[in-house]
Amino acid sequence: MKQYIFSAPGRTEISGNHTDHQHGCVLAASVNLKTTARVVLNGTSVIRIQSEGYPVISIDLTDLSVRDDEKNSTAALVRGVAAAFAQRGAKLSGFDAQVSSTVLPGSGLSSSAAFEVLIGNILNGLFFENRLDAVEIAKIGQYAENVYFGKPCGLMDQMASSVGSMVFIDFKDEQNPQVERIAFDFAATGHALCIIDTGADHADLTDEYAAITRELKTVCRFFGKEVLRDVPEDAFYKALPEVRAAAGDRAVLRAIHVYNENRRVLCQKQALLDGNFDTFLAYVKESGKSSWCCLQNVIPAGRKEHQEVAVALALAEELLAGSGACRVHGGGFAGTIQAFVPMDRLDSFKAGMEAVLGEGKCHVLSITPNGGMLEGETEVQA
C-alpha cells in the first residue's frame, strides 16, 4: 500500500498591514514551520483525518453541501476544499490522513491556511493530476474558509502558504490577483526573523477587527465605492473635511494608513529587489508606527490594564536599541508582533522578550522556498 506525504507551510506577513481587504498590496512569505499529512487511500467515499491531539474528522464525499452545524470547524474546511474540487470535475475518493503540525494555532502564522493548502494539494495530487496551480489552490482554501467555515478572510494567508518563498501580491483584481515571487536571501542579511507571541487572546475582539473594515467602508461609500483601492488618494484629501464629518476621524486615519501602506509595500519590494536591506528595515519601522498611530490596531479601544501588544513592541524596541525593526503582525490588537533582529543581538533579544512574556514566546523563523507540495511516497503495510 502506498503512503503519500504532503505538506504546506505557515506564513508570515512581511508588509501590508490590513491592505488586502481593501484590494491593496502585500508582501508575505512561507516559513519553516509546516503542516504535514501522511495519506493512504481507503477505498471508500469517506475522508478521515486524524490531527495530532484532536478527534478524528470524517467527511462523506457523497454530501459536500454547506452545513451550518460545521461552521467554525476543521471539518468545514475539508468539506469546502473537497466541494471546490468536485465543482471543477475532480473524481474524489476516500483516504485516511495522519496530520501533524509545527504551525501552532494562534501563533499568527496562519495554521488554518496551511491546513487548507495541505488538503488542496492532497486532492490535486491524488485525484486531479495536479491540474491546478498554487494560485488556484489558494483560492480554493479561501473559498472553503469564506463559504463553509464562515470567516470572511482575504486571500493573503492562503496565497503565501500555497506559492511559497516570499511573494508580492496585488489584490486590485481580487479574482485574479497579481502574484510575483521575490528572490531575496534573508539569511545573507545577518538578521533573524522573529515572531513574538504577546500572550493576548483574540477572544472578544471580533468587533475591533470588524470596525476596521466597517469604518473604511464608510469612507469608501462617501465616494460611491466599496474598497479604498478604487478611491483616488487626491480625491480623498481634497474632500477631507467632508469625509471627517461623514466617517469620523478614526476612519480617516485608518484610510491614511492604507494609502501609505500600499506605497510602502511597493517601496519595500523594490528595496529587496535592489538588495537594500537597510531601506527595507526603515519601511518596516514606518509601517509599525503607522499601524499604531493611524490604523490603531495595537491597543483595543478602552483597554488600560491590558495592553500586551503595546508592551511587547516597546520591549522589542528597547532590546533592539535602534537596530533591526519591529511591527505589529497580522490583524493586531492581540496575537503577535514581528521583529527583524541582528544575529549578534538574537540571543539577548530572545532572552529579554521571554523573560517578560514567558518561555517559548519568541519564535525564530526562516523563510522557506517551498509552498504546498508532495514531499514523497513510500510503501507501507496495509
Image (spheres, helix red, strand yellow):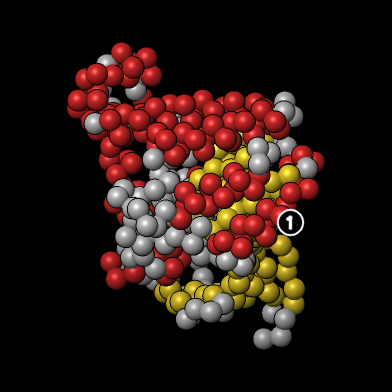
Across and down, in percent, residue 180 comes to 61, 35
Across and down, in percent, residue 347 comes to 74, 56
SS state under label 1: helix
Q: Residue at x 46, y 65 (%)?
A: 78
The quarter in which the C terminus is drawn is bottom right
* In the displayed structure image, the side of residue 10 where residue 4 appears, left or right: right
The residue identified by callout 1 is: 347
Q: Residue at x 57, y 61 (%)?
A: 356
Looking at the image, the residue that sits furthest to the left is 246
Circle 1 packing at 10 Å, graded few (<14), some (14-19), many (20+), is few
- Front residue of 92/288: it is 288
* In the displayed structure image, the side of residue 346 where residue 144 appears, left or right: left
Where, by quadrant of the figure, is residue 126 drawn?
Answer: bottom right
Looking at the image, the residue that sits furthest to the bottom is 382
The quarter in which the N terminus is drawn is bottom right
Is residue 127 in view from this perspective? no
Amino acid type of the residue tagged 1 in the rendering: Asp
- Front residue of 233/333: it is 333
Badge count: 1
Q: Residue at x 39, y 71 (%)?
A: 62
Across and down, in percent, residue 86 comes to 44, 59
Q: Residue at x 61, y 57 (%)?
A: 353
Q: Is residue 27 above or below residue 339?
A: above
Q: Is residue 1 above or below residue 20?
A: below
Across and down, in percent, residue 73 comes to 39, 68
Where, by quadrant of the figure, is residue 357 drawn?
Answer: bottom right
Where, by quadrant of the figure, is residue 206 drawn?
Answer: bottom left
Is residue 36 in view from this perspective? yes
- Front residue of 153/325: it is 325
